[in-house]
Image: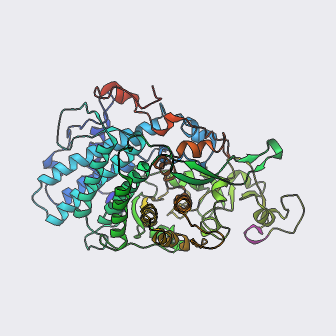
Amino acid sequence: MNSKYITKRKDSPSVFYQFAFALMLTLGMSACSSWIEEKPNGLITDERVGDSEEAAANWVTGTYSKLIYDMFCWGYFPKVLEFDADYISGPDWLFGTFGAGNFQGESDVTDALWKGCYGLIARANNAERHINAMQNLSTEAKNNAIGEMKFLRGFAYFLLVRAYGPIPIQPEEETTAYNQPRQSVDVVYAYITKNLEEASQLLYKNTDRLYQAGHASAGAAAGLLAKVYATQASAAMPAGTEIIVRTGPAYDGTGDDRAYAPLRSVTMQKNAVIGYEEMNAANLYQKAADWAKKVIDGEYGSYELLTYDQLWKKANSNASEFMFSLCTVSGDATYKVSVHSQYEGYMTEQGSDFIQEGGWVGCTRHWYDLFDSQDLRIVKGVKHRWRAKTQRESNSGFYYPQNNEYTIAATGYDLSGNYVGEPTGIYADGVSYYYSQDAQCLAFTTKYMDVTNNAINNADANFPFLRYADVLLIYAEAQNELGNSSEAIDYLNMVRVRSNATVASATGAAAIDSKVKLRSAIIEERAKEFACEADRRWDLIRWGIYLQAMNAIGGSDDAGVLKTRQERNLLFPIPQPELNTNKAITENNPGWN
């Protein structure tokens, strides 16, 4: 979403604002009816919105706005997509019952996913009908606007089917048939791929003159289509398929004597993923490879990896690597998300060293230990020192991680308590740094630090839903499963080389010389590359190793968040209000009453 489309004018409300907020009210009044119900237009009429390219743009923008306003702006996000995974952690009070695996009754799940996605779908359906009826706009503009609606519809259903399994498909045509039954997983995916394929042909490429940065593009549709096919393919792989995951309990010992436990390589046997059993994994991986290669070859626009130093700069948030992102406006009361506050924390004032509040969500030590020591994703991508406002008076701060290299640099003492010398490097600033084995000291990302104003709660950190690096790793994954290991390693290394990681090879001491090893390396690379991007849970789910990976932690993680899971956690529960009102849905997902 291009921020220029959601910037308010101070003189008079735009047509978009009159339209969008009336539509928000119309779609929001759902207390007594199903959330998949297609609402009537209410205050919105053709005469009010008009018939022009500007009118079509207003319908498009009003649909995009649902992604932020009341879907991802209230702190539901990134929690609902991110907090239930093995390598992510934070304070107990923030992760709450959802982070501990009890998804029922959580407004975060209900509002951000079920209600939010069906609201987005309703807007896309309504907007597409009105745009289709317009006469006073160019064919190109009309096709692109309709393509954006198809993209958003496919995106919303993809979020839903991964989380809930069988789900209702809301009719695109205007209808009063509000009680819609759940459709099987394969039927939902067929509808998703149809929408995305059509969108890929209708949307502007990011190289087209009329393309507007931040909007969905033909390449975004093609890239998401590759991810959708790879999701189905991996889920359809046979039960018993082996995957090696580096994991294990967080600590050895207890109390003051505990120390971080070393990573253990655990060979996991894939469980069948319900709903995907009859799909053909090989055919789906071929489709994933084909669509990813079309993006790579430039058939749908121009995409490239940014250098690591440029990757997370605010100025590059709409660069070609970021194929589709949640875009925000600095300090705006409506178009806001809590991404910067939750991952980075906002400062007492701009230029300050002290975090006023936030900076709670990070990755575990096991995630950090996946990396080579020179990998830029931990050298530069993780905070190694930070200070809370409460540490100003004591002239202290936190450091990370607790190992000899960083402990000596931060404190002058090694892990055995022996004095080695004065603090060095970034720590040689007269501040007393210390470490805490709890939620205060995690591997906090630096991905969302660069914002317009880092001293406000609602900073403009864009959140990437799809990056070009994802397309490259999808292609690598597909080629490995199709038996083309050499090509798979080449594309895996494109991502590794960017971050100065050790190059993967089929020979040598650390040879990746089997399909299982390469499969495992690609899945692990995804965990490293897309950390704090709401991707890990869904990789574990689609590969049928979610329960094994979560339970391998042996209880609680570094910060005391409970990671024990059971079968019911494989799917989110259908919200109770939907069950109460939609008479076509007669039962909840297994384990949720």
Residue 419 higher or lower than 154, as above or below: below
Q: How many marks?
A: 0
Residue 376 higher or lower than 394, as above or below: below
Is 44 or 434 nearer to us in this picture?
434
Placement of the C terminus among the 4 image quadrants: top left
Task: Identify the colour scheme used.
Answer: rainbow
Residue 36 higher or lower than 196, as above or below: above
Instruction: State the residue lying farthest toward the right.
Output: 418
Q: Is residue 425 magenta?
A: yes
Q: Is residue 244 magenta?
A: no
Observer able to see residue 124 = yes
Residue at left offset 48%, top offset 39% = 570
Q: Is residue 186 left or right of residue 247?
A: left
Is 79 or 548 nearer to us in this picture?
548
Q: Is residue 180 left or right of residue 80?
A: left
Is 214 or 401 nearer to us in this picture?
401
Residue 53 location (% of width, % of height): 18, 61
Question: Quarter of the image holding residue 299?
Answer: bottom left
Residue at left offset 49%, top offset 64% = 452
Residue 282 location (% of width, % of height): 37, 57
Residue 99 location (% of width, % of height): 56, 40
Question: Quarter of the image holding residue 318?
Answer: bottom left
Placement of the N terminus among the 4 image quadrants: bottom left
Task: Identify the main secondary structure in magenta.
Answer: helix
Residue 6 location (% of width, % of height): 34, 57
Observer able to see residue 215 = no
Residues in magenta, as a range: 424-428
